Amino acid sequence: MARIQGTLWDGVALRRLRAGADPDAAPRPVALPRAWELGWEAEAAAALAALAPGEGPASLPRAAEAWIARAAAEGRRAGLFEAAGAAAMQEGLRALLLQRRGAPGAEIWRETGRKTGRQAGQPTARGAARPAEAAPPRFVLNLPAFLDPEGGFAAAAYAEACALAVRALDALSGGRAERLRLGFADLAGLLAGLGLAYESGEARAVAAAIAALTRGAAAAESGRLAEALGARAPVALDWPAPPAATVVPGLAEAARAALDAAAGMPGLRHRALVALAPPDAVEALLGAETGGLAPAAGPVRSQLGAAGQLLDLPSRAALRAGPRAAALLGPVAETGREAMRQAVAPFLQAPPPAPVALPAPARPAPRPAPALRRHAGTVMHVTVGGHRVTLRTTEDAEGRLLEVAFALSKEGAAFRSLMEAFAQSVSLGLQGGVPLADYVEAFAYTRFGPAGLVEGDPAIPRATSVLDWAFRRLALDYLGRRDLPQPSEEDCLGDAVGHAAQVAPLLPLDLPAAASPRGRRRALRVV
């Protein structure tokens, strides 16, 4: 811990948890700053477990100090700065991380940043096979972390963070990388904190100004490095014009000033600087809920409770938006996404990726549910009156009936079509909340051909129709009803009167208790 003593890590209280990089990975002990917000510690812990090399215990200070110290050593070796400059850069990187404002990409945490820098910057020996081009080193800034208490945006602090990120990425590559990827995350969270709807013109102006500020601050720092180490690329002479004004005080002016400062440089050290990339575990460590330009997934987030149940809790963006969360974080149409991409793209040096929500962080697997009798449904084959009938059912995860479907082999196309339409209407009713018992009462013992002997279902030997067999079968399987009487052979004949479930008279008369259903029907004929 000698590298940590005397730095910003000194005195940082840590919270210890156990987390795995994904639900299938074995949990490992991890330690995070206790000051980081409660309620999201599982997400940050899983992210650190994914970023820290190895499989043993991992703490944020140790994992971060590995690449921070490497940046200082490589930068001094490349002549980017002296000891004092290296120390200042280290403290700046620690502060960014502790405030959850920025960090390098996952490849640097996993100690591959040095290899990436060599592949990006060193020439290949003559005659040797050229390796596949590696992605330039990446640094991401978490936009909501730059919201100031008054509801504005800390533009000066953001510009300083952009410059520090360029300096750190160049140092991590030993000064060899000609291309860097400086980007930002959780634009949707920033807009929610500012009270702006993602699809509004004000939101697009803010996003464009932030992209312009990122480009200008990064290019200005690249120009300062070029003054010391030599330029590799000219300064762009056709800077895109940033928005003339935004609803955020001072943001448009800061973007214009950053671009003007970059334009005054004699040359640049890097050929490309600003690019957005798909999110990785670093975004989750910083607390960003979305990557790049992606709109918010909604005002709620899902999380497993202590008992394994799924809970819907407010997202960070919803907490920032307050009472307007539902209005500001509603679904965004593709036209709105494309308009945001077009507003920001002129200030990027690579096409922005399609906006996608940040992948859900790894969570503990839910407790196993009791095994169900059937999970996906059943297929039953019988013969009713010599006609083959297939009944298919679909169930939800809890075994409730959702859909029914019939297949009849001998009937004509018109009859089959009617049965299909009937099955679809029943399925829609089941999914809309109509009880299965209502369908059983309505369609059991209905009479039409084919009818008669049922083969393939020992529990129902006879049926007055296909619907009679099907709904009595469903009542047995899903309602546990064993009180439905079996029709007799006479009930299944074409000239039978009534049906086997007719056990009450049509008139309010008191009948002998010993009278059978068939006797009642004979005694109560209407002439």
Image (tube, helix red, strand yellow):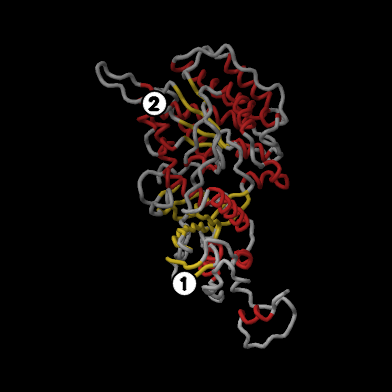
Res. 431 image quadrant? bottom right
Q: Is residue 9 above or below residue 453?
A: above
The secondary structure type at the circle numbered 2 is loop
Residue kind at label 2, given as amino acid type: Gly
Rendering coords of residue 7 (x, y %): 48, 41
Mark 1 vs 2, N-terminal side: 2
Choose between 498 and 306: the one closer to the eye: 498
Image quadrant occupied by the C terminus: bottom right
Rendering coords of residue 18 (x, y %): 44, 55
Q: Residue furthest left?
A: 127
Choose between 58 and 478: the one closer to the eye: 478
Q: In this view, does 111 lie above or below 409?
A: above
Residue kind at label 1, given as amino acid type: Ala
Choose between 264 and 358: the one closer to the eye: 358
Mark 1 touches mark 2? (CB < 8 Å): no
Mark yes or no: residue 13 visible: no
Q: On the image, numbered disc 2 is attached to which residue?
A: 174
Residue shown at 72% from the left, 85% from the top: 510
Residue shown at 40% from the left, 52% from the top: 24
Rendering coords of residue 524 (x, y %): 69, 79
- Mark 1 residue crowding within 10 angstroms, few (<14) / some (14–19) / many (20+): few
Mark yes or no: residue 49 visible: yes
Q: How many labels, in total?
A: 2
The secondary structure type at the circle numbered 1 is loop
- Mark 2 residue crowding within 10 angstroms, few (<14) / some (14–19) / many (20+): many
Q: On the image, numbered disc 1 is attached to which residue?
A: 459
Residue shown at 38% from the left, 27% from the top: 134
CA gap, disc 1 and disc 2? 79 Å
Left or right, 176 with reference to 141:
left
Q: Which mark is residue 369?
A: none
Q: Is residue 454 above or below residue 226?
A: below
Between circles 1 and 2, the one closer to the viewer is 1
